[in-house]
Image (cartoon, rainbow, N blue to C red):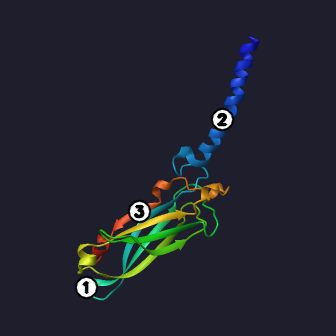
Amino acid sequence: MKGKRQGILRQWYVLVPFVLVAAILLTYCGGGGGGGGAVCPDPAVARIDFSIVSLTSQFAGVVRIAGVVRNVGAGSYESGPTQQSVLLYEVPIGGTAALKANQPFQNLAPGQEVTVTYERNWDSSSPAEGEFPPDYRIIITYDPDIYMDGNLMNDDCNGGNNDLTRSGAGINALF
């Protein structure tokens, strides 16, 4: 009986640290589900908005493209000022993506947003914009070593929501 108790005790000593580590990880990131945990930050590209700034004719004017990033996690995102940025790309059909705007950000409380904007001339009656409008892509980028800096409050829980593309056809619908 004594040998059996010692075997159970040994198993218990091995099991307890494993359970504690698992509990801490589940609490931090809500079971790895991206934002459902107690303190898990999750900056996410929420949307791309189009608006008309000014009209030069019925079919042309200056438009604004805005990419919105929101912390959809339950925990605050707290980081250094140059460790992350929101990038806005214009992607012509069959062409190469061109960076049009860059918005660095630092801290985001749950629900807080940061916006990157770009304004340009637009002619919905031209082939370049009207018939074959470019796409717009928003990407959240991080320093390559952000997950190794020892700060858990700047470790994004869900990298799957850091990129969004929208067709510029939505701009034509505004005219």
For the residue carrying disc 2, how many other residues have a C-alpha within 10 Å: few (<14), some (14-19), or many (20+)? few
Q: Nearer the viewer, mark 1 or mark 2?
A: 2
Q: Compared to 85, does 8 lie above or below?
A: above
- Identify the residue shown where x is 29% and y is 73%: 133
What numbered label is drawn on residue 18? 2
Pointer 1 and pointer 3: residues touching (CB < 8 Å)? no
Q: Could you tell which of marks 1 and 2 lies nearer the N-terminus?
A: 2
Mark-to-mark CA distance, 2 and 3: 37 Å
- Identify the residue shown where x is 63% and y is 62%: 78
Mark-to-mark CA distance, 1 and 2: 66 Å
The N terminus: image quadrant: top right
Q: Does dot 2 land on a helix, a strand or a loop?
A: helix
Which of these two is toward me, 33 or 90? 90
What numbered label is drawn on residue 171? none
Pointer 2 and pointer 3: residues touching (CB < 8 Å)? no
The residue that disc 1 covers is 58
Q: Which residue type carries mark 3?
A: Leu
Residue 16: where, in percent of width, then height? 69, 32
Which of these two is toward me, 32 or 58? 32
Residue 39: where, in percent of width, then height? 61, 52
For the residue carrying disc 1, how many other residues have a C-alpha within 10 Å: few (<14), some (14-19), or many (20+)? few
Residue 160: where, in percent of width, then height? 46, 54
Which of these two is toward me, 95 or 76? 95
- Identify the residue shown where x is 66% and y is 58%: 149
Q: Compared to 140, does 64 lie above or below?
A: below
- Identify the residue shown where x is 51% and y is 47%: 33
The residue that disc 3 covers is 164
Q: Which residue type carries mark 1?
A: Gln
Left or right of 38: which side holds 140?
left
Q: Could you tell which of marks 1 and 3 lies nearer the N-terminus?
A: 1
Q: Which residue type carries mark 2?
A: Phe
Q: Does dot 1 land on a helix, a strand or a loop?
A: loop
